[in-house]
């Protein structure tokens, strides 16, 4: 207004109501819904197929300080969807945030703290197959268990021979 770039009468109309929105780091409950929204938006924009957010990535996202607020979260998800070829957003996809903002993670260890109940995923408007979901879950569990079939079968609470069949079926073995 001092430079004359903004009309004073319009400013006073807009300044009638003051809206204070706390920073994203103080609204942790908004992080996952926003992440899912951005994941779906950029899947559609770039023709990608990200569907899940691993528990480790969820913990990372919820404990990052987000100095750039929602815009930084949006740009982070866009970068992952654009540059990565996966169906799961993983903690490793977020490593660049540590390089750029080493002091901005308030999490002592990705493996400590409250445990997540599982994957977060977005159901696309056009749907997707149950096989896609099963493949992504098996792949994530197989990786988590260091590609050990016995451990993975126990982790997924399924017989080893069923896991072996599905690993072959999805080309994961």
Image (cartoon, rainbow, N blue to C red):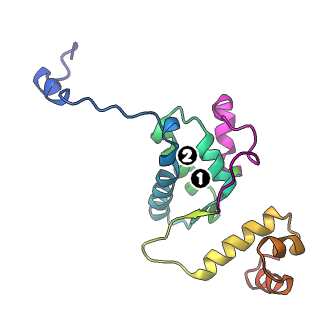
The percent position of residue 74, horizontal first and vertical second, equals 48, 46
Q: Is 36 covered by the magenta stretch?
A: no
Q: Are marks 1 and 2 in contact (CB under 8 Å)?
A: yes
In the displayed structure, would residue 63 be above or below residue 140? above
Q: Quadrant of the N terminus?
A: top left
* Quadrant (top left/top right/bottom left/bottom right) for the C terminus: bottom right
x and y percent of residue 25 in the render? 53, 36
Q: What residue is pinned by disc 1?
A: 80
Q: Secondary structure at mark 2?
A: helix
Q: Which residue is mark 2?
A: 76
Residue in front for this viewpoint, 68 or 27:
27
Relative depth, front residue between 146 and 3: 146
Q: What residue sits 13% from the left and 20% below the top?
A: 8
Spot the residue most to the front. Answer: 114
Image quadrant in which you'd find residue 156: bottom right
Residue 90 visible here: no
Residue lying farthest to the left in this orientation? 9
Camera-nearest residue between 117 and 82: 117
Task: Using a 10 Å C-alpha cutoff, classify the residue at mark 2 as few (fewer than 14 neighbours), some (14 to 19) or many (20 or more).
Answer: some
Is residue 113 shown left or right of residue 19?
Answer: right
Looking at the picture, how far across and down is residue 46, in whole percent?
49, 61
The residue depicted at 22 percent of the width and 14 percent of the height is: 3
Res. 62 mark: none
Instruction: Pick out the residue farthest to the top.
Output: 2
Q: Secondary structure at mark 1?
A: helix
**In the rendered image, is residue 101 in sight?**
yes
80 horizontally vs 99: left or right = left
How packed mark 1 is, by other alpha carbons closer than 10 Å (few <14, some 14-19, many 20 or more), is: some
Please give left or right for residue 157 compared with residue 61 in the image: right
Residues drawn in magenta: 92-118
């Amino acid at each position: 207004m001092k430079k004359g770039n903004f009309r004073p009468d319009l400013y006073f109309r807009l300044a009638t109501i003051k809206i204070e929105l706390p920073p994203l780091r103080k609204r942790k409950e908004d992080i996952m819904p926003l992440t899912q929204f951005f994941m779906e938006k950029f899947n559609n924009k770039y023709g990608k197929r990200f569907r899940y957010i691993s528990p480790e990535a969820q913990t990372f996202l919820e404990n990052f300080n987000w100095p750039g607020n929602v815009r930084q979260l949006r740009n982070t998800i866009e970068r992952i969807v654009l540059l990565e070829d996966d169906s799961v957003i993983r903690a490793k996809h977020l490593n660049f945030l540590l390089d750029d903002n080493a002091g901005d993670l308030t999490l002592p260890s990705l493996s400590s703290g409250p445990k997540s109940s599982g994957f977060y995923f977005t159901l696309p408007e056009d749907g997707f197959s149950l096989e896609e979901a099963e493949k992504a879950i098996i792949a994530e569990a197989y990786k988590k268990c260091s590609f050990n079939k016995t451990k993975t079968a126990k982790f997924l609470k399924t017989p080893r021979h069923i896991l072996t069949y599905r690993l072959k079926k999805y080309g994961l073995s």
